[in-house]
Amino acid sequence: MSNVLVDIQDICAGYDGNILLRDVSLKIYERDFLGIAGPNGGGKTTLVKCILGLLKPVSGCIVFPDREVKNRTGYMPQINQTDRKFPILAREVIESGLMAAKNKSKSEKKEKVRVIIKEMDIENIAEKAIGKLSGGQLQRVLLARAIVNDPKLLILDEPSSYVDKPFETHFYQLLRTINNKDTAIVLVSHDMETIRSYAKNMVWVEETLDYKTLIV
């Protein structure tokens, strides 16, 4: 059996005393491709924030048996969480994904960024400010940042919302290739049909009568 990368144990989580997730338990394994689906507002992003350490559960715990996973987790947020007025170039956004790569030299980082820019076919926009990019172009940049450090765990929150159609097929093929290279992927979407053919395992987050919960 594959090793466990993340062990979520009976967590309850929410905001300002309002519990959105209750008694959620879930394991993410090495080379897993986990689809988390559910309606908008169902608690999917809340779960992601707990995994990333951005939100502390009210109770329960999240265990990382391999501590390196915490430092090598790539995250692609929803595009509407990105401040497009911030004065930063696409290339600089991608470079920021290597901030935790203390074992890489400047030349190695530069080469890694060059390779990922080419792989994502964004050479023509690398020196543009993110405020000048289309939604699809920005999604490519955010994905490049998330994978530039060869993460052990890659979390994508509604990644296909703004992916342009010509890139969509390549996008999912790229995720499959990344997954086959030993990266576990957690793909969050409100559209189960979109991710069903790619995910190895699925969970559903939905609202019940008095709280939102997760059904494996």
Image (tube, rainbow, N blue to C red):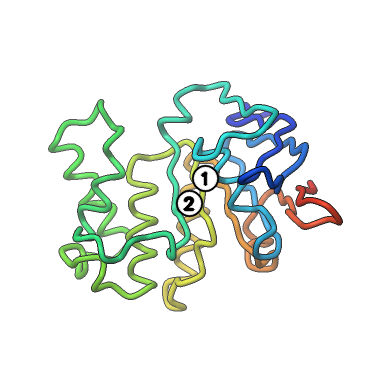
Please name the amino acid that badge 2 sits on: Thr
Residue under the point 51% across and 47% down? 155
In the foreground, 212 or 52: 212
Q: Which residue is mark 2?
A: 177
Up/down of 50 relative to 212, above or below: above
Q: Is residue 81 left or right of residue 66?
A: left
Residue 161 or residue 183, whichever sits in front: 161
Q: Position of residue 84 (x, y in %)?
A: 30, 65
Looking at this rendering, what residue extends furthest in the left direction?
107
Q: Give the camera-side residue of 198 and 55.
A: 55
Disc 1 marks which residue? 180
| Mark 1 neighbour density, 10 Å: few (under 14) some (14–19) many (20 or more) | few
Instruction: Please rate how many residues cluster around mark 2, counting C-alpha atoms within 10 Å: few if below 14, some from 14 to 19, many from 20.
Output: few
Q: On the image, which quarter does residue 138 sit in? A: bottom left
Residue at horizontal 43%, vertical 64%?
79
Toward which corner of the image does residue 73 lie, by quadrant?
Answer: top left
